[in-house]
């Protein structure tokens, strides 16, 4: 899986504490560099501030680097709240990855245990970059907070929706929240306006998990429904963000749901991590070098 490995390496490089601050310094806009007091070849060409304007605050390059470092460290919080990227519960394996389009992601995943069951979440916050990534910390905190007292995913979503709507300034958020009872082999889920996950049962007939309600934060009194599906040996669940299906090739064609479904079928016999990277590799091959403009997130749950 060479393409997938390359993309994974790209992710690791971006998340490396030694590389990220330097990469950010090189890609910030000229106006931001000017505001930060950083002198570059480009900054000398920037038009001077109008007469009477307040002078930009003076920052030394080392102070700017310290700021980048603090931002990066702060954004490790949502990564920790997301839970393990690889996890086994009973006969089930869970694998998930987030591939940001830039440095910070508005997509999120969450995997954790509560009440002898495992909660699984995949979501997408409106917007991209640093702001969306900071909001994800709040979203991930809400998932864990409400799941301690509410054991059904639709009730957790309803409580989160009221909380986000009451804030007034929270961005709209889509999310699918599932509870895996790995002892009984049952999955309960509720979908808040997110891309419908694909369930590949052992029988081979794909199902889309769309039961739920609207996206979070739009209306205070939104109602959500839950659905129960059997989930046992040989079954596989693939949850993803729209950055996967909307990835484009040089002709402007999107990867789409049909290609994803074919890839899920072809990877049905693989372990979850192998399935995940086979799908990512297929998307990367399809894009043929065209840069992504949206975060790409994938979670695979299965048993063998």
Image (tube, helix red, strand yellow):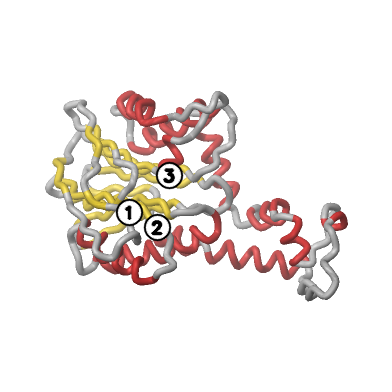
The answer to whether residue 304 shows anywhere in this view is no
Q: Is residue 40 above or below residue 285?
A: below
Residues at marks 1 and 3, CA–CA distance in whole angstroms: 18 Å
Q: Is residue 202 above or below residue 142?
A: above
Whether tag 2 and tag 3 are in contact, CB under 8 A, the answer is no
Choose the circle earlier in sequence order: 1 or 3.
Answer: 1
Q: Which residue is at 29% across, 43% downward? A: 93
- Nearer the observer, disc 2 or disc 3? 2
Q: Which residue is at 34% across, 42% downward? A: 195
Label for residue 297? Answer: 3
Label for residue 147? Answer: none
The answer to whether residue 105 shows anywhere in this view is yes
Q: Position of residue 43 (x, y in %)?
A: 83, 57
Q: Which residue is mark 2?
A: 172
Choose the circle earlier in sequence order: 2 or 1.
Answer: 2
Number of marks in the rendered image: 3
Label for residue 215? Answer: 1
Whether tag 2 and tag 1 are in contact, CB under 8 A, the answer is yes
Q: Check disc 3 and report its element: helix, strand or loop.
A: strand
Residues at marks 2 and 3, CA–CA distance in whole angstroms: 18 Å
Q: Position of residue 165 (x, y in %)?
A: 34, 66
């Amino acid at each position: 899986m060479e393409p997938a490995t390359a993309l994974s390496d790209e992710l690791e490089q971006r998340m490396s504490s030694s590389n990220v601050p330097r990469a950010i310094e090189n890609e910030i806009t000229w106006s931001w560099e000017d505001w930060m007091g950083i002198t570059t070849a480009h900054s000398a060409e920037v038009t001077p501030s109008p007469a009477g304007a307040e002078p930009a605050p003076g920052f030394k390059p080392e102070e700017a680097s310290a700021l980048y470092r603090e931002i990066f460290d702060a954004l490790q919080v949502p990564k920790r709240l997301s839970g393990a990227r690889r996890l086994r519960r009973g006969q089930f394996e869970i694998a998930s990855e987030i591939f940001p389009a830039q440095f910070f992601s508005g997509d999120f995943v969450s995997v954790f245990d509560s009440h002898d069951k495992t909660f699984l979440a995949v979501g997408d916050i409106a917007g991209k970059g640093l702001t969306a990534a900071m909001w994800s910390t709040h979203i991930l905190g809400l998932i864990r907070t409400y799941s301690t007292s509410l054991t059904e995913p639709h009730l957790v979503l309803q409580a989160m929706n009221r909380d986000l709507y009451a804030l007034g300034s929270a961005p709209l958020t889509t999310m699918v929240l599932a509870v895996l009872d790995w002892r009984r082999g049952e999955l309960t889920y509720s979908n808040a306006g997110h891309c419908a996950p694909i369930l590949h049962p052992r029988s081979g007939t794909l199902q889309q998990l769309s039961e739920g309600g609207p996206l979070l934060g739009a209306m205070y009194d939104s109602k959500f429904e839950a659905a129960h599906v059997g989930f046992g040996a040989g079954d596989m669940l693939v949850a993803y963000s729209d950055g996967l299906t909307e990835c484009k090739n040089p002709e402007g064609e999107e990867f789409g749901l049909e290609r994803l479904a074919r890839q899920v079928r072809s990877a049905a016999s693989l372990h979850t991590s192998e399935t995940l990277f086979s799908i990512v590799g297929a998307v990367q091959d399809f894009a043929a070098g065209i840069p992504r403009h949206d975060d790409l997130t994938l979670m695979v749950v299965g048993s063998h």
